[in-house]
Amino acid sequence: MTKKVGYLGPEGSFTEAAAKAVLPDNDRYPYSTIPSCMAAAAKSDIDIAVVPLENAIEGSVNMTLDYLIHKHDLPIIGEITVPIEQHLMVHPAREKDWKDVSNIYSHPQAIAQCDDFINNNLPNAKIHYTNSTSSAAKDISEHPGFNGAAIANYLAAEKYGLKIVEQNIHDYDNNHTRFVLLSNKDNKDSFESKENQSGKTTLMITLPSDYSGALHQVLSAFAWRKLNLTKIESRPMKTGIGNYFFIIDVDQDMDDVLIPGVIAELEALGCGVRILGSYPCFLSLSLEVKPILE
């Protein structure tokens, strides 16, 4: 059955490419912001929301985490990791004099990923943050008078008729982003059998109080059961300075013994535990982004 899949748009975004890679035969709907996409899934306007969660260079997308924790009770039902290639693109009218542009438009994470290139090549350009890389490309396409450039992917350049003048301008190689699929319905049957599939369980843990050794006790509950943790991150609880919860990724699906045993032990210690999802993880080896510079 065809699903309605929302993603951070507009068309040509990395998120659309991720959605297409993991859910190729479903209807896709762009949303202008991460919160609006997640809200649509919470209200069942769409079946699945695809949003960015973490970049290998810049770390977690805090907006996604905060809305997942504080605003919407949307289980994570899947994850896909995709390679990220950031390119500098301009309106065709500015292809020859791109080094004279005075404005750069892109998503804050993309800008941060390309900091060295910007400082070395366009140090005087004014930075403008957009909701997504593809919205930056769309803005440049529709407003040639901006005297600007966008940082986005090949798909956006192709979609909006821009010229890529510098390729792969991100500061580090192996640039990848994790995207999560969120749904308040059981939509795991939407995934086709794919290669490079693994399982993961994500937990949110709050400590009973700020005392010496509290985090050590939490981690010990995983360690003696030999459960591998792929990520531990603290985030503010928004209840006062110094109050944090922890997001922990366990490198396996929910089982009947080990992870439930961890949860029971942590709750006995007075910790709060919330399961954010136990889900399949996919790795996309390529987004079929083709070089177009000679």
Image (cartoon, grey):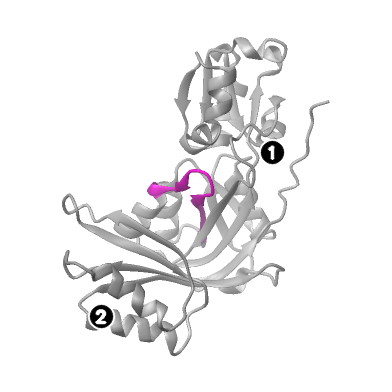
In the structure shown, which secondary structural element does the residue marked by tag 2 occupy?
helix
Residue 87 can be seen in this image: yes
Vertical side of 132 occupied by 103: above or below: above
Task: Tell me the kind of residue under disc 1.
Answer: Leu
- Residue 147 falls left or right of residue 258: right
Asked if 121 appears above or below 180 in the picture, the reply is above
From the top left corner, tell me how far across and down residue 183 is, in percent. Answer: 47, 65
Residue 276 position in % (x across, y down): 40, 68
Q: Which mark is residue 271?
A: none
Seen at 69% across and 34% down, the residue is: 159
Residue 138 visible at all:
no
SS state under label 1: helix
Mark closest to the chain's N terminus, 1 or 2: 1
Q: Is residue 92 magenta?
A: no
Q: Over which residues does the magenta segment extend?
A: 48-63
Q: Position of residue 257 (x, y in %)?
A: 43, 90
* Residue at the extreme bottom: 257
* Nearer-the-camera pick, 26 or 225: 225
Residue where numbered disc 2 is placed:
267
Question: What secondary structure do most residues of the magenta stretch adopt?
Answer: strand
Q: Residue furthest right?
A: 294
Tell me: residue 222, above or below residue 155. Answer: below
Label 1: few (<14), some (14–19) or many (≥20) C-alpha neighbours in 10 Å: many
Residue type, label 2: Glu
Position of the N terminus, as image quadrant, is bottom right
Q: Is residue 53 above or below residue 102?
A: below
Q: Residue at x 50, y 74 (%)?
A: 186
Residue matched to label 1: 155
Q: Nearer the viewer, residue 58 or 130?
A: 58
